[in-house]
Image (spheres, rainbow, N blue to C red):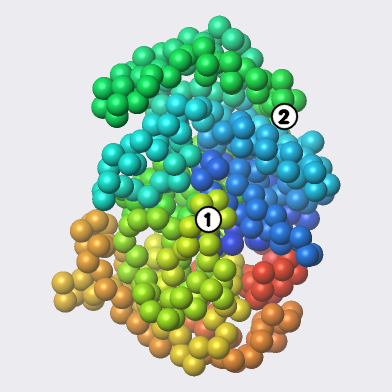
Amino acid sequence: MPALVLLGAQWGDEGKGKATDLLGGSVDYVVRYQGGNNAGHTVVVGDQKYALHLLPSGILSPGCTPVIGNGVVVDPAVLLSELSGLNQRGVDTSKLLLSGNAHLITPYHTTVDKVTERFLGKRKIGTTGRGIGPTYADKINRVGIRVQDLFDESILTQKVEAALDFKNQVLAKLYNRRAIATEQVVEELLGYADQLRGYVADTTLVLNDAIDAGKVVLFEGGQGTLLDVDHGTYPFVTSSNPTAGGACTGAGVGPTKINRVIGILKAYTTRVGAGPFPTELFDEDGEALRTIGGERGVTTGRDRRCGWFDAVIARYATRVNGLTDFFLTKLDVLTGWEQIPVCVAYEIDGERVTELPYSQTDFHHAKPVYEMLPGWSEDITKAKTFADLPKNAQRYVKALEEMSGAPISAIGVGPGRTETIEINSFLS
């Protein structure tokens, strides 16, 4: 049975939650392997809509074990609040497993995140202000706080004290902010220990044993490929690796155990926050995509920037992730356009390029080269098979598949759980 990675092939918000939930009924474990509560998934089950920020989407699938891996950074208050909210709605959250090696977002991380972003002014990155970047920075600097530290007050106190020695100097002398008391942070963190204890496990051991036993394990990225700290539009990126390689390090499972890598593609393109976006629209088409697609960030509440489909980015995602399949989402949003532009290449300083430029300068100057594809006006939300789609919608999907470099194995034709056309099974 397969172990699968499912990730965003653009700048995030492609509909990973729906794809994960679609597979959830056939999957034994769903694993978040990176990011934190700066990511969000909207999952629609019947007439119920769930907004998940930190929890794996599989938590909504009975019989599936949701796992938060070691590569995730966890705000304990957010995690407990999210669990409580789902429990109040009748969702069983008792099977959640939380890696003891995952790093904790503390109050001083969110403080540093917010004051730093304000200090940068017009040069700001566009972070969510939730402490994600500072937490990953502490992890790399080896002054981070891990989940397992909650259960040893002496170690926790030593680590918080060491982290604040430097941070309080920065807060006071650079940002003119009051120093943060070690005792206050330790007291708050210890208050989460008993509430989280029952969820904590050696998730690396659990997942490897599950794969060896023939269970189906799905690894779920929190953000998109172009937000990867190494392979994205740096510095306008997240602080971790949502690309396929991140699943191995963020969950402790070797690459030889991964069978398929599925990229989620929106039928157009969006991104949240600052940074280059070659196909971004500033006209009525952009506003129509935003309105029809409901393009507002699940976590941030910010309007998403909208643009036409970018095949250059899709090809890049195929290459750096080793994608075996695509899940194309929100095809229904494009219903009603007489013609639909698709970016097939960029023009940079008068030269046509068909691959993503490695130079940040070149990418900032990239202008989209469009090919026009015929649109359709028929309602496609009731389509159950590929043949049910209007001919022009079929042509659009096939064109995107050819341009992107991997087969499109499923198509989202509406927001609902069942509004999906499955062409090839991801579990074969």
Determine which of the numbered discs, if any, sits on residue 148 in the image: none
The percent position of residue 21, horizontal first and vertical second, equals 70, 57
Task: Say whether residue 358 is left or right of residue 418.
Answer: left
> Residue 331 appears in which quarter of the rendering?
bottom right
The percent position of residue 48, horizontal first and vertical second, equals 76, 60
Determine which of the numbered discs, if any, sits on residue 199 in the image: 2
Task: Say whether residue 269 is left or right of residue 81.
Answer: left
**Residue at 60% over, 47% down:** 53
Determine which of the numbered discs, if any, sits on residue 301 in the image: 1
**Residue at 72% over, 39% down:** 83
Check the image and report above or below for 137 versus 45: above
Check the image and report above or below for 326 versus 191: below
Residue type, label 2 = Tyr
**Which residue is the extreme one toward the top?**
154
Task: Say whether residue 199 is left or right of residue 90.
Answer: left
Q: Secondary structure at mark 1?
A: loop
> Label 1: few (<14), some or many (≥20) within 10 Å?
few
Residue depth check, mark 1 versus mark 2: number of the one nearer the observer: 1
- Which callout, 1 or 2, points at the residue further toward the start of the chain? 2
> Label 2: few (<14), some or many (≥20) within 10 Å?
some
Q: Secondary structure at mark 2?
A: loop
Residue type, label 1 = Gly
Tell me, yes or no, if residue 19 can be seen here. Answer: yes
**Residue at 59% over, 20% down:** 188
Which quadrant of the figure contains the C terminus? Answer: bottom right
